[in-house]
């Protein structure tokens, strides 16, 4: 007897868990990606699928999904560690909430798009791209206004 597993019957949580990076800090729940990666199998994946589908159906996630630990790593270790600008804040969240996020992305990726002018949280773009667009826009309008002012 062969079992066909479609995208909603367990593979998505398994794929999500397998895509997690290893060696990262644990979230507030103390569960690491290694805990899930080395323990999860198809039956647990089906349980996760049912749980995640119920979260989506009810439009509710547990409060713990919103909890995180804020860590301020140093940007430049040779720089001034007393300078506030030499730090950036990262939030370590629950691994289960990360798996849920990856599950939702996998399930709805055909419906999720972003605007071409979005630069943050988008693969292949950065803040530098946004700054460049703003600079070019300001320069363009500055020279258009100056040229129109000189003409009139």
Image: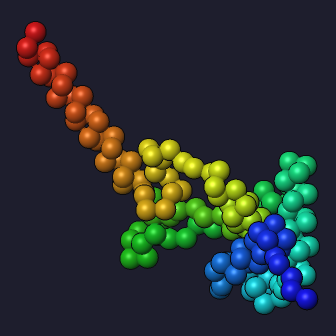
Q: Position of residue 132 (x, y in %)?
A: 31, 48
Q: Percent from the top left, x then y, of residue 27?
A: 75, 72
Q: Which residue sits at x=42%, y=57%? A: 126
Looking at the picture, does residue 52 appear above or below residue 48?
Answer: above
Q: Residue at x 28, y 41 (%)?
A: 135
Q: Position of residue 138 (x, y in %)?
A: 27, 34
Residue 90 visible, this angle = yes
Residue plotted at (66% across, 84% down): 22
Image-based side of 66 in relation to 118, left or right? right
Q: How many marks?
A: 0
Q: Which of these two is toward me, 24 or 36?
A: 36
Horizontal side of 76 relative to 106 (left or right) equals: left
Q: Looking at the figure, which quarter contains the C terminus?
A: top left
**Can residue 29 be seen in this snapshot?**
no
Front residue of 140 and 44: 44
Please tell me in which quadrant of the rendered image residue 125 appears: bottom left
Residue 5: quarter of image: bottom right
């Amino acid at each position: 007897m062969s079992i066909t597993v479609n995208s909603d019957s367990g593979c998505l949580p398994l794929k999500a868990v397998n895509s997690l990076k290893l060696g990262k800090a644990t979230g507030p729940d103390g569960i690491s990606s290694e805990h899930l990666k080395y323990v999860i199998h198809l039956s647990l994946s089906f349980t996760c699928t049912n749980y995640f589908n119920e979260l989506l159906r009810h439009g509710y996630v547990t409060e713990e999904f919103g909890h995180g630990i804020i860590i301020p790593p140093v940007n430049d270790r040779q720089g001034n560690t007393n300078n506030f600008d030499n730090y950036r804040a990262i939030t370590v969240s629950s691994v289960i909430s990360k798996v849920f996020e990856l599950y939702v992305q996998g399930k709805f990726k055909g419906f999720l798009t972003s605007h071409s002018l979005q630069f943050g949280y988008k693969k292949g773009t950065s803040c530098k791209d946004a700054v460049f667009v703003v600079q070019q826009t300001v320069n363009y309008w500055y020279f258009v206004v100056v040229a129109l002012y000189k003409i009139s």
